Amino acid sequence: MSRLQHFGWFLARGFGPHGWGHPYLDWDYRWTSPELYQQSARELEQAGFDFLLIEDAPSLGSASTIDLRVRHAFGGPKHDPLLLAPYLFAATQRLGVIPTVNPAAYLPYTAARQFATLQHLSGHRLGLNVVTDTGSARHFGDAPQLDHDAAYDRAEEWLEAVRALWRSWGEGALVADPASGVYADGSKLDAVRHRGEYYAFEGPLNAVPFTHGEPVIASPGGSGRGLGFAGANSDIQLALAPLTEKSVRDYRAKIHAGAAARGRRASDISIMFAIQPTIVASAEEADRLVAASASPSDETLRVIAQRQSSDLETDLTALDLDRPLDLAIFGDHVSQGSIRRLTGDRDPASTPLRAHLAALARLGRMSDRSGFVGTADEFADLIEELGEWGNDGVLLWGDLHPVTVHRVLDDLVPILRRRGILRRELVDGGLHANLRAF
Ligand SMILES: Cc1cc2nc3c(=O)[nH]c(=O)nc-3n(C[C@H](O)[C@H](O)[C@H](O)COP(=O)(O)O)c2cc1C
């Protein structure tokens, strides 16, 4: 039995040079102007998506490897998605917009005030994807970089402080009664004197309270701390895990345990699995793509090496494809998780670099669950199956170029709607209202 699920779009490489390296660059959209994003945001709204979430990293990475990041625009430049959000709100009526924010970049008072302003301006459609990246710390002062868990401690303190400021206008504080001429009752404002480990400031907030809830909080961390943060604080968790029944159910159980530990209900949080499908017109075409991916050209491997060089901040493009990869080339700043994603279960000492890159090039079929290439009907089968395991929603992953959005959605939207998985219309009342509509 199909049931409705929530859909979001994840603009995975942020607000950057859209179309770079793709033939569709010749559509001549300018990535620094709002029209490209506004056009796609309108399509997502018409498709019944709850929200558009925009990845971000404020930094170009380590000074010594900046060229690797910007040469092919894989790691930057990136403009600030928070400032793109108002343009997207202006172009739509009901779509939620969730820019990524890092607590390191905003003092709680500044954050609470700016986000409150946008929440009002947008008709309560703002969300915030709270991330804990620590690599960009040097742009915000000379304090030592926090470790992984301390960054989560700081994020929790930050969010608690921001929420205390949003709640500093108590019940009845806003009067707005033209007959008496009274706008507000100052005695009902909480002074919020915060003295924490990372922040010290005073309130109350110079912004009026919300009518349709606070900005939605999303989070993407997948570590134990990350899942705990989500259970305790988030309205949406961006989930990345193998899409087997056991893995999906285990992931959900961990988040729900974190929520219960803080007195929250499982239904307070929408867990949305991130998927990047390649939707094609026929099963034959899907088979052909998957077969071709098993023997990638050197040109394909070179592009993958460029992308990996940006993500790993280590130049792989100059290495011999037919020699094993010496792990000593990766500095301490490179995440072990990212290195493992490159090398998989293969023995680095005996595996040529070509084999690692070829493994990343390999595609799989949706129909046998070995990958994400398939027809719209096969994708709908997958989503339906996720729904049977209790799944709340799906985050489709890609850039936001209108060509990409159409390629993914053209056939998919009608099929998902006919099967009763995708809603026909968003509701009024903001992002919370849409997340709770079913
Ligand atoms: C779907 C998804 C989206 C993410 N978006 C961002 C992002 O926009 N900015 C960022 O710095 N990290 C992003 N991350 C990475 C996480 O915030 C985090 O750095 C990473 O998962 C490590 O945290 P963890 O150790 O708790 O997993 C994303 C991760 C996932 C799975």
Image (cartoon, grey):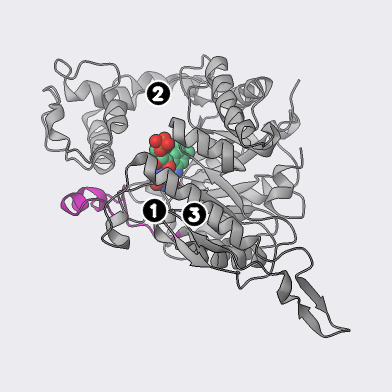
Q: Amino acid at mark 1?
A: Leu
Secondary element type, mark 1: helix
**Residue at point 12% right, 30% down?**
328
Q: Quadrant of the N terminus?
A: top right
Closest to the observer: 366 or 208?
Answer: 208
Q: How dense is the environment of label 2, judged by Cα within 10 Å: few (below 14), some, or many (20 and up)?
A: many
Position of residue 189 relative to residue 69, above or below, is: below
Q: Nearer the viewer, mark 3 or mark 2?
A: 3
The residue that mark 3 highlights is 158
Q: Residue at x 58, y 43 (%)?
A: 233
SS majority, magenta: loop
Q: Helix, strand or loop at disc 2?
A: loop
- Magenta range: 59-80
Left or right: 336 with respect to 46?
left
Quadrant of the frame with the C terminus: top right
Q: Would you name the residue on which mark 1 appears? A: 25
Amino acid, disc 3: Trp
Q: What's the distance in space between the residues labelled 3 and 1, CA to CA?
A: 40 Å
Along the viewing direction, whichever of 263 and 233 lies nearer the viewer: 263
The image shows residue 210 at horizontal and vertical percentages of 70, 62
- For the residues labelled 2 and 1, say whether their Cβ atoms are less than 8 Å apart: no
Quick one: 108 or 77, which is closer to the camera?
Answer: 108
Q: Nearer the viewer, residue 200 or 1?
A: 200
Query: Residues under labels 2 and 1: Cα distance?
Result: 24 Å
